Image: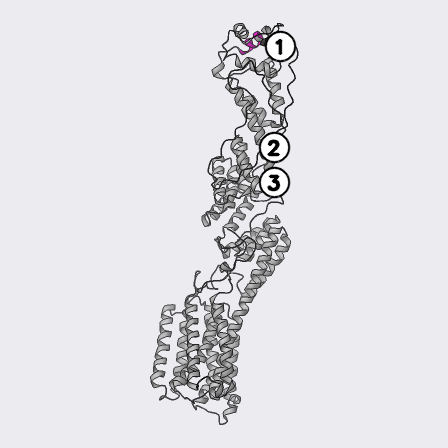
Amino acid sequence: MAEGEDKSGSTANGFSLSSIVRPFGEQSESDRPFIPLVGGPRLFILLLYVSVLIAASLEFFAGKEYLWYGSWDIYNTYVFVVSGVFVFIGVVMLFTTKKLGQDDYDLPIPRPLMGMLGFIMLAASGIVLVFYGKDIGAWAILLSITLVYGFLMILLSVKGMGMHDSMRLTLYATGIIFMIMVPVHEAFGVLKTEEQDQYFFTALNLALLVIGMFLALVSVQSLQTRDGYLGAWLIGAMAIFLIAFHEQLGIVSSGTYSPYDRGLALIGITFSFLPVAMYVWREKIYIFLWSRLRNANVLIEAGDYKGALIHADAAIRQCSHAGIEDRFALPWSIKADAHYRLREYDKAKVFYETALKIDPNDSVAWSHIGNMYAFEGKLEDAMKSFDRALQIDPGNAEAWNNKGAVYQSLRMYEDAIISFDKAISHEPSSFDAHMNKARLLSKLGHSNEAVPEYQAALVINPRSQDAQNGIQREFHRAKCLDVVDGWEQMGLDASPLRAILDQDPANFVKKTKEFLANVVEERTQLTVLPSSEHIDVNGAIKSILRATEKEEGATLETLMDATHLSQHNLILPLALLMETDHVHFATIGRKQVYVSRGRAPEKPPEPPPPPPPEPEPPPVVAKTKPKKTVVPSAKPKGKPKPEKKKEKPKEEKPKAEKPKPRFFRRERRELEEPTASILVFSRKK
């Protein structure tokens, strides 16, 4: 896009002058899409011309020789050189125009041939005037007209000059020729007026002036591009150049500027200054246009979407006044952005489609259209839109994030993780990508990998309650998983415990104890892993209870003799009894024994759960695997040690269950989306 490409050297909250000021060779305004940048070398050259023109005009019309520095010849040479330099620079500026879109040129003569014929006409006429101008009399008029039309054909061969402006420039040049014929035919004595000071008011001359002014004024005001205004300026400047050119060659030379020369100069000055004024006015329109777009963008970021719509509509009206509403996509994209955030998706889709007809390479617009398809449940269309957005801009983090959300909805979890990693690698500060990846990892049971993603999201948005709850929930889940792993290492089939954790993580500790109590009391069937199938766990439990009912209790060696189990095989039944408070550890005399009579000693109060650790900064490269978070196990994973009492796992209440993965659609105030197209002053994309 645009966007201004970020693609674009833009700042976060203001204009970036380096991205607004265009290079010497600018894009043609007849292109589609077109970005109306302002300022730059062209405007500087034209303003310099105006300043020189004003100074030269004062001396030109003063009519006093003492105002001419040095002598008449020096002054005429000055006008000849300066006007020639400006004409040459203007032609260079036109030929450096970059034509990126389709050319609407449809004249029977190809552009290169048109330019070549124009150059031949201009050069041949100039050469004849240089060598024979003094001697051919009124034929010099015809040669001068041929020279002007040759110059016009050179201008029409410029790639950036569309057919519309080409026709208007032809009428403009014809109008100027009609007007300059008035002083020219008088100077050469063709149908000359007897009273020199009144020659403007004869019927012939008035007819020529009226026809010429009508053609020139109608055509110049209907020009559509700044290249057209530049061409009109050059035709007017060429009239000034021809005055000094004739004087330098001595063609009807008077040694000073005669009334006829002054009439010719007045026409050249007026009709070179008028296109410059219209060029500057077009620049003013573009400045106001960008101001409207900037205001709309700021209001979108502030959440005032209805206010943004007002400025977007005003920008579209400015484009209509400038004749670029069908070539400049950004105002339509901004308007679609505002409707998108107002959740008026039908309207947003219409304006996005309008913008994409103008600029099919707007990556963010494609991404937003994909979001709307996803909201409607059209996941296949959504995926196509995201793929199109990423084909245009592979670094579009939002499109990667949203594509990952669609993959997750389709249960293609591996592809979803890859997409979230892509989004994070292109934009490490993407809150959505970190949160979506964390939730998916949590859903897949990878709590230790989900915690760093929640921490990264919390660094990006410290006020996010979702990220804070996610960290607490995953730490609790990691501790519970360690409990489950501990029972599995002791040989118990812990699949019922995993089901409890998935269904009701908030009451995992309580329900786990109830399940284990039912196992010990044989109300629930005991299932062990294949590695422990040789152990009669229920029989061992009964033997341990009989041995520990004695007042003196039972040592570990006594329990091994009573159950005929090794110390390793004794771990599971003994752990079940201790976890369900059927057996506890006590010191009788100098012996440490297991007993089942009496109450187990009170456990010391558990300290309050520590606050979540300080969040780490988000990884710059998202695909780097986060370090595994080590959480202390609540169950022993080796032999039971008689000298230490087993602690119950701490019970924590996690927050609400995990929400579904979010698309780029925001549900909280603290999060804002980037806009759909790229403004040169504040957009990314």
Q: How many marks?
A: 3
**Residue 152 sits in quarter:** bottom left
Q: Report the residue that reaches farthest toward the front.
A: 590
Q: Amino acid at mark 1?
A: Ser
Q: Nearer the viewer, residue 83 or 587?
A: 587
Q: Residues within 10 Å of mark 2 (few under 14, many from 20)?
A: few
Report if residue 69 is visible in the image.
yes
* Nearer the observer, 576 or 639: 639
Judged by depth in the image, the label closer to the viewer, 1 or 2, is 2
Mark 1 sits on what residue? 596
Q: Position of residue 559 (x, y in %)?
A: 55, 8
* Residue at the (56%, 65%) spot, across then down: 285
Bounds of the magenta segment: 537-543
Cα–Cα gap, marks 1 and 3: 49 Å
- In the image, residue 309 lies at what x, y percent? 61, 55
Judging from the image, what secondary structure is the residue with disc 1 in? loop
Question: Magenta includes 494?
Answer: no
User: How far is mark 1 from mark 2, CA to CA?
Assistant: 37 Å
Q: Which mark is residue 464?
A: 3
Q: Which residue is mark 2?
A: 611
Under mark 3, the amino acid is Ser
